[in-house]
Image (cartoon, coloured by chain):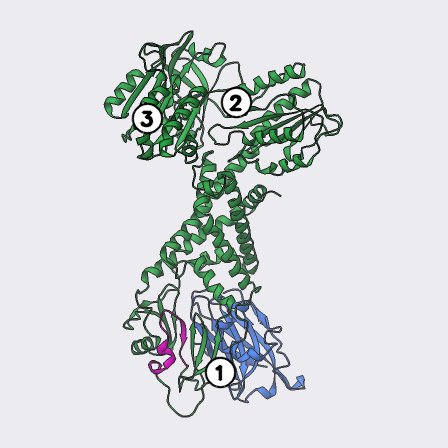
Chain colours: A blue, B green
C-alpha cells in the first residue's frame, strides 16, 4: 500500500472528437481498491455517452487478453473499437492498491450526460461488470464514490 | 545430441524449477479434491430453469450463478450493498455456506504459474513445462531401451537403488507427466497470448424494451431445456439496466436471452481453442475430473523430488566414473587404437588400464568412444571394449557405431573385441557379440577371439591381458585398479572348518563390524546395509583387487557370514582360510539386487551346490514369515562339505524351510548331482513353478548351466523356459 502505481493516460482522438485540444481539461481519476483478499484486479475505466453507448477507453489495468471477457460490459461495448487498448494498458492492480488515471477530456464531454464506468474482475472471484458508474459532471468532481465489489472509493478531479 | 544427454542436462539445469512446480502442483490438487468432496451428486439432470426458480426464492439480488467443474454450484449476489458468494444445494436451492475459491494461500498458485516473478516467470514456468515434456519423452525412450522394449516394460528393474527408484517411479508416472506438461504448455500459450481462446468479439446485445415486465427465469424455454450438467454460468439481467439480457454459458458456447421475452438475442459457439482449454484444465488441474485422477496428479507432483534426487545421484555416480584417459595420442599417429562403448563409464576404467599398459610398453595409443571407430595410417592393432545394455543394445552413446562399422571398408588391421556384461541379464555381452560378428562379416582380421568379462571381473581381465601379451609377443602388464569404495575393517568372531573337496578345505567365517555412530549412519559411512544374496568384497592384504563372496547373512542378523573354499594359489582364499578369530579384513558391500528375494508369498525354489548354498542359507535364516522355501542342495560327501548342516536341520524344524533335498555325488547311493535330485522331483518342481514360484540358483557356472538345462526339460510340459522365467524376474543366478 505504500507503493502507488501512478499511471498516466492521454486519451486517444476517438473520444475527443473535439478538434481544439486547447478546449480540453485534464481529469485525474483516483481509484482505491478494497483489501478483497485476491490476486491483482483487472479494471477497465471507460466512458459512455448520454445514451449509454461506448465513447472510449481511459485505462485498462491487466495485460492478458484471455481475461478481458471477464470485464464483460466493457468487452462487449468496446468490441467495435479497434484502438481500445492503444496506449492505455498497464499492470493489474493489487488488492488495497491505488490506481491513478490522468486523461485530457474535451470540454464538451463534461456535464453532457457522459458517465465514467469501471468494470472489475479478479481471478477465481466474481466478475463485476459495471462495478461503478459515475456521471462526468463538475458537481461530482472531488466526491468519493464506492464500487460494488472491489472499489473502496473513486474520486476524480477536473483541472 | 543423444536422448541421454538431453535427459541429463535438462534434468540438471531445470530440475530445481521442476521441483518447485511439482510440489506446488501437489498442494494445488488439494482444492479440487476438497471441492469434489463438497459437490452435490446426482443433480446434473436438473433443469436450469427450475434451479433459477429455487435459488431466487432463497437469495435476493442474484447476479450470476456458476456451475464449477467440480459440480459445486456458486451463486453471486448483490443485496443491500453487500456482495455475497455462496454455495447452494441445486436440489432445493438452500444455501450450503459461503464460497471460498481456495483454501490455499494465493502464493502457492502464483508460485506454480509464475514462480512469483510476474510475466517473466510465466515464461519461466512455460519453459519448465517444455523441459518437462522433453524430459518425459527422452525418459520414455531411455526407459524403453533399458527395459528392452514395450513387451518388457513391466519387467524387473535392475541396477543401483537410485537407478531403480528413477526407473520404477518413471514407469508409474511418466504418462501423467507427459500429459501434465502438454496441457501446461497449451494453457501457458493461451495466457501468453499465442493462442486466442475467443476468436470473435462478443456480439452487441440489448433486450428490446416494450413496456412488458421481465419474464421469470423459470418460464424461459431455453433455460428449461438446458440441464445443470451442461451449465457453466448464467448471468442474470441487471435490475438497473432495462436493456440488459440473460447470458447463458454452456460447454457448447454462449447464448444471450431477452429479459422480457426469453428469446435468444445472439449465440456464440465455443471455439475449438476454448474446448481444448477446458480439457486441458480438467486434465492438468483435475478440476471436475474423477477424484482418482486428481490423486494421481498430486502423487505425480510429489514424485518429482524422487526423480530429482535419484537423477542427481545417478549423474554424480556416472561423473565419478567418467573416463579421463591420459597420454592419448592422435588417431593419425597411434599404432594401437582402443574404441570403447560404455554405459555407466566403468568400461573406461578397463580401457585406461589397457591404454596405460600399451603406453608403458612403448606404443602410441589412441582411445576414443566406439562411435568414432576408424583406422589410422600407423595402426597395427585395434581393440574394441564394449559393454551391453538391457536387451543387448549398444550403450546409448554408441548407438550409431554398428552402422558406422558397416559403412566402412574392411581394414587390414586386426581387431580384438572384449565384451563386458552381467550374466544376470538375458543378453549377456550381446552387443559385443554383434560388433564382433559384424567385424568378421566385413572381413576385418582378428588377433584374439571375443572374450567376455562378467561383472567387471579384474581377474578375468588380467587373464585376457596375459593372452594378449602372448599374442603380441611382448610383455604387457594390465594393471586394472577399480575405484574401490571405502572399506570397513571386519573382525572375525568365529570359523567353522570343513574338509571340503580333496586338497580344498573350506570354512564358514563369521565377522562383526565396528559400531557405527548415528552421524556415520546418516552420512552413509561404515558398512552399507546388506541382505543375504548381496556380495561382500574382501580386499586381501597386498592386492588392490577385491574378491566377491555371496553373503549368507543380512544386516539384521548382526553379522557378516560367508562360505569360502580354498582355491590353489588363490590370494584371497588362502588369506581367508588362514584367518583366526580376532583378526581383521578390509571389506565393502556390493548390492546384488537381481538376486535378492522380493517380499512376496510365492513359493521359492533354492538350488545350490557346494559353497553356493551360502546365500540360500541366508534367505532361509531370515524367513520369519515362513514363506514356503524348498532347498535342493548338492555336495560331494556329507562328511566333508555339507555346509550349514546343523543350521539347515534346525531351520527345517522351525519351519523356515519347507523341504530339503540333498544329493551327494561322491558317496554310494548319494543321489548324484543336484540336477539329478531335481529330475527326481520333476513333478513337485512343475507344481511349484506353476504356482508362481521364484527360483534362485547359486553355484559354479557348469552347475548353473546343468540346472538350467534340466529345468528347461522339466518345465517344457508347462510351456515355460528358464529364459522366460528370467525375463519375468522369477529366475536369478549367482554363479562363480
Q: Is residue A103 above or below residue B658?
A: below
Provide the chain ID for the residue under circle 3. B
Q: Secondary structure at mark 3?
A: helix
Q: Secondary structure at mark 1?
A: loop
The residue furthest top is: B503
For disc 1, the chain is B
Residue B145 is labelled as: none
Specify which label sits upstream in the sequence, 2 or 1.
1
Is disc 3 in the same subunit as disc 2? yes
- Depicted B426 relative to depicted B580: above or below: below
Task: Find disc 2 in the rendering and name its residue.
Answer: B457
Q: Mark 1: give few (<14), some (14-19) or many (20+) Cα within 10 Å.
A: some
From the viewer's perspective, is B732 left or right of B9? left
Q: Which mark is residue B205?
A: 1
Q: What is the x, y in percent for residue B720?
A: 39, 33
Q: How many marks?
A: 3
Do marks 1 and 3 share a chain? yes
Q: CA distance from mark 1 to mark 3?
A: 86 Å
* Image coords of residue B109 (percent x, y): 46, 58
Image height check: is B330 above or below B114?
Answer: above
Q: Residue drawn at (71%, 21%), measured in percent from left and top?
A: B363
- Magenta segment, which residues? B216-237
Residue B221 colored magenta?
A: yes
Query: Which residue is denoted by mark 3 in the rendering?
Result: B682
Looking at the image, can residue A144 be seen? no
In space, the residues marked 2 and 1 are separated at their CA atoms by: 83 Å
Q: Are marks 3 and 2 in contact (CB under 8 Å)?
A: no
Return the residue found at the far left. B653
Q: Residue B243: which quarter of the image?
A: bottom left
Front one among B323 and B340: B340
Nearer mark to the viewer, of 2 and 1:
2
Question: Is tag 1's residue or tag 3's residue first in the polypeptide sequence?
Answer: 1
Amino acid at each position: 500500500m505504500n507503493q502507488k502505481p501512478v499511471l498516466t493516460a492521454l486519451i486517444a482522438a476517438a473520444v475527443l472528437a473535439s478538434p481544439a485540444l486547447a478546449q480540453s481539461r485534464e481529469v485525474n481519476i483516483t481509484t482505491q481498491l478494497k483489501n478483497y483478499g485476491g490476486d491483482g484486479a483487472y479494471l477497465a475505466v471507460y466512458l459512455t455517452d448520454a445514451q449509454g453507448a461506448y465513447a472510449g477507453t481511459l485505462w485498462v489495468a491487466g495485460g492478458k487478453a484471455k481475461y478481458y471477457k471477464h470485464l464483460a460490459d466493457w468487452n462487449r461495448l468496446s468490441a467495435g473499437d479497434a484502438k481500445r487498448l492503444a496506449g492505455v494498458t498497464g499492470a493489474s492492480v493489487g488488492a488495497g492498491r491505488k490506481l491513478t488515471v490522468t486523461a485530457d477530456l474535451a470540454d464538451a464531454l463534461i456535464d453532457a450526460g457522459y458517465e465514467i464506468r469501471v468494470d472489475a474482475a479478479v481471478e477465481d472471484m466474481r466478475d463485476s461488470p459495471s462495478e461503478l458508474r459515475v456521471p462526468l459532471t463538475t458537481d461530482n468532481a472531488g466526491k468519493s464514490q464506492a464500487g460494488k465489489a472491489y472499489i473502496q472509493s473513486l474520486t476524480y478531479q477536473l483541472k | 545430441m543423444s536422448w541421454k544427454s538431453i535427459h541429463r542436462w535438462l534434468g540438471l539445469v531445470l530440475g530445481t524449477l521442476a521441483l518447485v512446480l511439482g510440489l506446488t502442483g501437489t498442494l494445488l490438487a488439494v482444492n479440487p479434491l476438497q471441492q469434489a468432496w463438497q459437490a452435490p451428486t446426482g443433480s446434473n439432470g436438473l433443469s436450469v430453469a427450475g434451479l433459477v426458480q429455487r435459488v431466487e426464492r432463497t437469495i435476493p439480488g442474484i447476479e450470476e450463478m456458476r456451475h464449477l467443474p467440480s459440480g459445486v454450484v456458486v451463486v453471486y449476489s448483490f443485496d443491500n450493498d453487500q456482495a455475497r458468494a455462496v454455495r447452494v444445494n441445486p436440489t432445493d436451492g438452500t444455501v450450503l455456506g459461503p464460497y471460498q475459491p481456495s483454501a490455499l494461500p494465493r502464493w502457492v498458485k502464483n508460485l506454480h504459474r509464475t514462480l512469483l516473478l510476474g510475466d517473466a516467470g510465466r515464461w519461466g514456468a512455460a519453459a519448465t513445462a517444455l523441459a518437462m515434456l522433453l524430459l518425459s519423452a527422452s525418459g520414455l525412450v531411455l526407459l524403453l531401451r533399458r527395459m528392452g522394449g514395450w513387451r518388457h516394460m513391466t519387467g524387473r528393474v535392475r541396477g543401483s537403488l537410485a537407478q531403480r527408484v528413477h526407473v520404477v517411479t518413471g514407469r508409474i508416472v511418466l504418462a501423467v507427466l507427459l500429459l501434465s506438461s502438454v496441457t501446461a504448455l497449451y494453457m501457458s500459450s493461451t495466457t501468453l497470448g499465442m493462442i486466442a481462446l475467443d476468436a470473435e468479439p462478443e456480439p452487441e446485445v440489448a433486450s428490446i424494451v416494450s413496456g412488458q415486465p421481465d419474464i421469470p427465469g423459470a418460464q424461459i424455454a431455453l433455460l428449461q431445456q438446458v440441464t445443470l450438467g451442461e451449465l457453466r454460468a448464467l448471468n442474470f439481467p441487471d435490475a438497473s439496466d432495462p436493456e440488459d439480457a440473460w447470458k447463458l454459458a454452456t460447454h457448447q458456447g454462449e447464448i444471450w436471452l431477452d429479459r422480457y421475452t426469453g428469446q435468444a438475442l445472439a449465440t456464440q459457439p465455443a471455439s475449438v481453442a476454448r474446448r481444448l482449454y477446458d480439457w486441458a484444465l480438467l486434465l492438468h488441474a483435475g478440476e471436475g475430473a474423477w477424484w482418482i485422477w486428481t490423486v494421481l496428479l498430486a502423487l505425480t507432483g510429489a514424485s518429482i523430488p524422487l526423480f530429482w534426487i535419484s537423477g542427481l545421484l545417478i549423474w554424480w555416480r556416472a561423473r565419478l566414473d567418467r573416463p579421463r584417459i591420459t597420454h592419448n595420442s592422435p588417431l593419425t599417429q597411434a599404432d594401437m587404437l582402443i574404441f570403447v562403448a560404455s554405459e555407466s563409464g566403468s568400461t573406461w576404467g578397463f580401457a585406461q588400464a589397457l591404454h596405460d599398459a600399451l603406453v608403458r610398453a612403448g606404443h602410441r595409443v589412441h582411445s576414443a568412444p566406439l562411435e568414432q571407430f576408424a583406422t589410422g595410417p600407423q595402426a597395427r592393432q585395434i581393440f574394441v571394449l564394449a559393454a551391453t545394455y538391457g536387451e543387448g543394445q549398444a550403450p546409448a552413446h554408441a548407438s550409431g557405431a554398428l552402422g558406422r562399422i558397416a559403412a566402412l571398408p574392411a581394414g587390414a588391421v586386426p581387431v580384438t573385441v572384449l565384451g563386458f556384461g552381467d550374466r544376470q541379464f538375458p543378453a549377456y555381452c550381446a552387443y559385443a557379440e554383434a560388433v564382433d560378428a559384424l567385424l568378421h562379416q566385413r572381413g576385418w582380421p582378428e588377433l584374439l577371439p571375443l572374450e567376455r568379462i562378467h561383472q567387471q571381473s579384474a581377474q578375468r581381465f588380467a587373464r585376457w591381458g596375459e593372452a594378449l601379451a602372448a599374442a603380441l609377443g611382448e610383455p604387457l602388464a594390465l594393471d586394472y585398479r577399480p575405484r574401490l569404495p571405502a572399506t570397513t575393517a571386519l573382525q572375525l568372531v568365529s570359523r567353522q572348518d570343513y574338509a571340503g573337496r580333496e586338497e580344498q578345505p573350506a570354512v564358514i567365517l563369521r565377522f562383526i563390524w565396528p559400531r557405527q555412530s548415528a552421524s556415520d549412519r546418516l552420512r552413509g559411512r561404515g558398512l552399507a546395509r546388506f541382505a543375504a544374496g548381496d556380495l561382500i568384497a574382501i580386499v586381501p592384504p597386498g592386492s588392490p583387487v577385491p574378491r566377491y563372496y555371496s553373503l549368507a547373512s543380512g544386516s539384521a542378523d548382526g553379522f557378516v557370514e560367508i562360505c569360502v573354499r580354498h582355491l590353489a594359489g588363490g590370494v584371497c582364499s588362502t588369506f581367508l582360510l588362514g584367518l583366526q578369530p580376532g583378526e581383521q579384513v578390509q571389506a565393502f558391500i556390493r548390492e546384488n539386487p537381481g538376486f535378492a528375494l522380493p517380499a512376496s508369498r510365492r513359493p521359492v525354489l533354492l538350488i545350490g551346490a557346494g559353497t553356493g548354498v551360502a546365500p540360500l542359507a541366508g534367505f532361509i535364516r531370515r524367513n520369519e514369515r515362513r514363506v514356503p522355501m524348498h532347498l535342493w542342495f548338492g555336495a560331494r560327501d556329507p562328511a566333508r562339505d555339507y555346509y550349514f548342516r546343523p543350521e539347515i536341520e534346525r531351520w527345517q524344524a522351525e519351519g523356515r524351510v519347507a523341504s530339503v533335498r540333498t544329493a551327494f555325488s561322491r558317496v554310494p547311493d548319494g543321489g548324484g548331482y543336484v540336477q539329478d535330485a531335481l529330475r527326481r522331483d520333476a513333478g513337485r518342481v512343475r507344481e511349484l513353478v506353476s504356482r508362481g514360484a521364484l527360483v534362485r540358483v547359486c553355484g559354479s557356472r557348469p552347475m548353473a548351466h546343468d540346472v538350467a538345462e534340466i529345468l528347461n526339460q522339466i518345465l517344457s510340459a508347462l510351456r515355460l523356459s528358464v529364459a522366460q522365467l528370467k525375463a519375468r524376474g522369477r529366475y536369478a543366478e549367482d554363479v562363480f
